[in-house]
Amino acid sequence: GQFWPERQKHSGIVMADRNEAWAQLVIGTVQTLQSEKRLAHVLRSGPIDYLVIDEAHHAVAAGYQQVIAALKDCNPQLRHLGVTATPIRADEKGLREGYQKESAHFGIKELVKQGYLAPPRWLAIQTGISLAGIRSQGSGEDRDFNQTQLANVYETSNCFDLVVESHKKYADGRQSVAFTVSVDGAYALAETFKAAGIPAAAADGKTATQERKWLLNDFRTGKLQVLCNVALWTEGLDLPEISCVHQVRPTQSDGLYTQMIGRGLRLFPGK
C-alpha cells in the first residue's frame, strides 16, 4: 500500500485466517503455502504467472522449493524473481541452484553512495572476552557458534555494563537495537540499560503479537530508546529511526551479521 497504492484493491493476503486467493496479486508466507490445502485453495483461482520471493537467500531451502515446484507444476511458464539484501548462505549453497542469473546487484557501498542507505560508522569495543574455546555447531544456514557455550562466556554483567557504558559514550540519545546471544541475555541487557536510566525493553518469539506492537510503537514515539532481542528483529524490521546497532552477539555468519547491521541503515531525517 505504501509503494504501490494503485494495486492495493487488487491485492489479497493468504496467511493465518485470511484466504484472499481471489486477488490478482496474492501475498503469502512460505510457511502458509507449504500447506497443501492452503496452496490448493490459492491455485483454484488460477495459476500464478509471476512469483516474487523476498529474502531470496532462503529460496533454495526445502520448504521454498516445495512451494516453487507446486507452482511450476500448475504453470510451467512461471517467471520467478528473487530479491534479498543478504545474498549469502552460511552453507555456501549457491543461489544458482534456484536462479538462472543475477539481473541486478547493489551492495551496501553502492546504495550508500546513491543515497538510499545511511552511511555507517563502525566502532569496535574491546571486551577482553576470548571465544577461543567455543565450538561451532549446526549445518547449512544454522552453522555458527554453539549458542549455549557462547552465552555462558559472553553474556556477563561486565559485558552488559560495557555495552551500556559504550551507549552513553558514543550513542547517547540514539534510538538503538541490541542483538544478544540468548533470550535471557536480551532481558538482562534491557534491565542493565534501565538501571542506568535508559528506557529499554526486550522481546522474544514468545512475546504476544500485541505486546510487540506496543513496544515498537513506544520505540517510534521515543518512550523506549533501546530494543533488545536475539533474532526477533533481524529480518524485515522497518524502523528507520534506528541509528545505532549494538552487536552483543558474536557470529560466524556473514549473512546474519549483515542483516543485523542493516537494521540501522534505513534513511531518516537527521541520521
Image: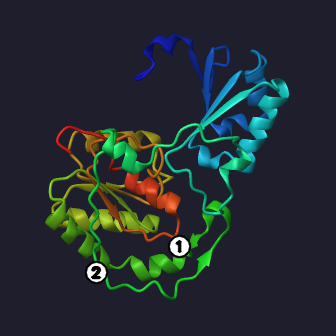
Picture residue at 52% right of the left edge, 70% below the top: 252
Q: Secondary structure at mark 2?
A: helix
Q: CB under 8 Å between callouts 2 and 1?
A: no
> Which kind of residue does numbered mark 1 sit on?
Gln
**In the figure, 106 relative to 176: above or below?**
above
Tell me the crowding category of disc 1: few under 14, some 14 to 19, or many 20 or more residues within 10 angstroms, Cα based.
some
Can residue 32 be seen in this snapshot? Answer: yes
In the image, 234: left or right of 45?
Answer: left
**Outermost residue toward the right in this view:** 73
Q: How is the image coloured?
A: rainbow
Which callout, 2 or 1, points at the residue further toward the start of the chain? 1
- Give the position of the N terminus as an image quadrant: top left
**Which mark is on residue 158?**
2
Picture residue at 77% right of the left edge, 19% below the top: 47
| Percent coordinates x, y for residue 171 in the rendering | 19, 59
Tell me the crowding category of disc 2: few under 14, some 14 to 19, or many 20 or more residues within 10 angstroms, Cα based.
few
Picture residue at 26% right of the left edge, 43% below the top: 241
**Residue 203 found in image quarter:** bottom left
Q: Which of 120 and 113 lies nearest the eye of the viewer?
A: 113
**Residue 45 found in image quarter:** top right
| Percent coordinates x, y for residue 59 in the rendering | 66, 45
| Percent coordinates x, y for residue 35 in the rendering | 75, 36
Q: Which of 236 and 98 lies nearest the eye of the viewer?
A: 98
Can residue 16 be seen in this snapshot? Answer: no
In the image, 124: left or right of 101?
Answer: left
**Which mark is on residue 147?**
1
| Percent coordinates x, y for residue 80 in the rendering | 68, 32
Q: Which of 39 and 55 lies nearest the eye of the viewer?
A: 55
> Which kind of residue does numbered mark 2 sit on?
Asn
Q: Which of 207 and 78 lies nearest the eye of the viewer?
A: 78
- Count of labels shown? 2
